[in-house]
Amino acid sequence: MTGPARAARAAERGGLDIGVGVALGGNSLRGAGDFYRELWDQGFTSFWSGEIDGPDGFAPLHIGAAAVPEAHFATGIVSPYLRGPALLAMSAAGMADAAPGRFALGLGPGSPRIIEDWNGGELSRPYQRMRDTVRFLQAAFSGEKVEADFETFSVRGFRLGLVPEQPPPVLLAALRPDMLRLASREADGVILNWVSPDDVRRSLAACGPQGEVACRIYVNPGLDRAQFSHDARRLLAVYANVEAYAAQQSWLGRGELLGETWDAWARGDRREAAEALPERVLDDLFITGSPEACHARVAEYVAAGVTRPILTLFPLGADPATALRTLSPAAMGG
């Protein structure tokens, strides 16, 4: 969907152009088309997939593109460490052909757990690998034969057999200044994660991005405080101890607040690491409350510069149907 068309759709549905993270997890892809259609009818305008241990990042989007030919789709994210350059280009070109002008390729390095422990790869030199991947994809999407030595890989004589009529924009997941500047300089936009609205402003000031500013926003409406704290702590304790996210949070000024969590994790005490997370950090990085309060908080992200809020339910294994229905633009009067 083009920018003006998405804006018109958003105006019809309450003024916010809202995407949703489709974490199907262990749920079957059978019936997913109906799920997409329901979300579209509720006012969500874009659908974002990832790949951890459920379906791969592209299969759910193909189902969505067939079910809702008006909607916008994006990977958020897939990693260039899990596919060779040519296969990544083919996967993206196939999805761009299935949803012409309505697909964006979101790329991010991924985590050591996924890249190394589960897939036998090596997560090395992520800045250089992301830069090289963007440059290769731009050449491949143009239809030219790629014969080039990049810093982190070489490609010999590859040409896409299916060249997309509209090359998909490439968005980079970026946490700190170097990658943020790379996204601004060489890609078509940025994907932010684990940030508050104030963090969005700081991140954008560091890179001055042009184009799409997508942001994953962790939300679950109507949780009581005890359940909110439990669910948020379990999720954040894991991510806050991934090296890249720990460095991001330090850069954002939360190093002192997260020190006890990092120390407990290093000792192998996962429970203490979760319990040590300050309530202030939970309130910065998660949203709960009434649907109206959740939407007001999402609007703060938009005011900070986000062009594509991506609502992501936590806990990630939760059944999304009811929560997304209550959060939908249609439910908010759009």
Image (cartoon, rainbow, N blue to C red):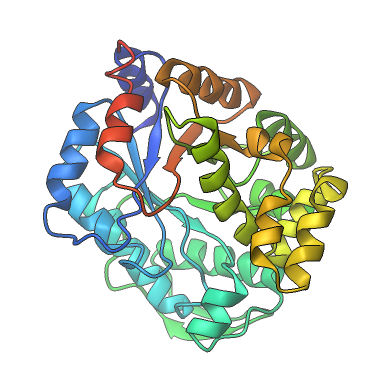
Q: Quadrant of the N terminus?
A: top left
Q: Is residue 145 above or below residue 102?
A: below
Q: Position of residue 249 (x, y in %)?
A: 76, 50
Q: Is residue 125 above or below residue 107?
A: below
Q: Position of residue 196 (x, y in %)?
A: 66, 34
Relative to 268, 2 lies left or right? left
Residue appearing at x 27%, y 67% in the figure: 162
Residue appearing at x 70%, y 63% in the figure: 241
Relative to 46, 250 lies left or right? right
Residue appearing at x 34%, y 68% in the figure: 56
Rendering quarter of residue 16: top left
**In-front residue for pair 4/257:** 257
**In-front residue for pair 307/53:** 53
Q: Quadrant of the C terminus?
A: top left
Relative to 15, 252 lies left or right? right
Determine if residue 102 is in view: no
**In-front residue for pair 177/264:** 264
Rendering quarter of residue 235: bottom right
Q: Position of residue 124 (x, y in %)?
A: 69, 79
Q: Is residue 136 above or below residue 103?
A: below
Determine if residue 91 is in view: yes
Q: Position of residue 166 (x, y in %)?
A: 34, 49
Residue appearing at x 32%, y 33% in the figure: 324
Q: Is residue 292 above or below residue 193?
A: above
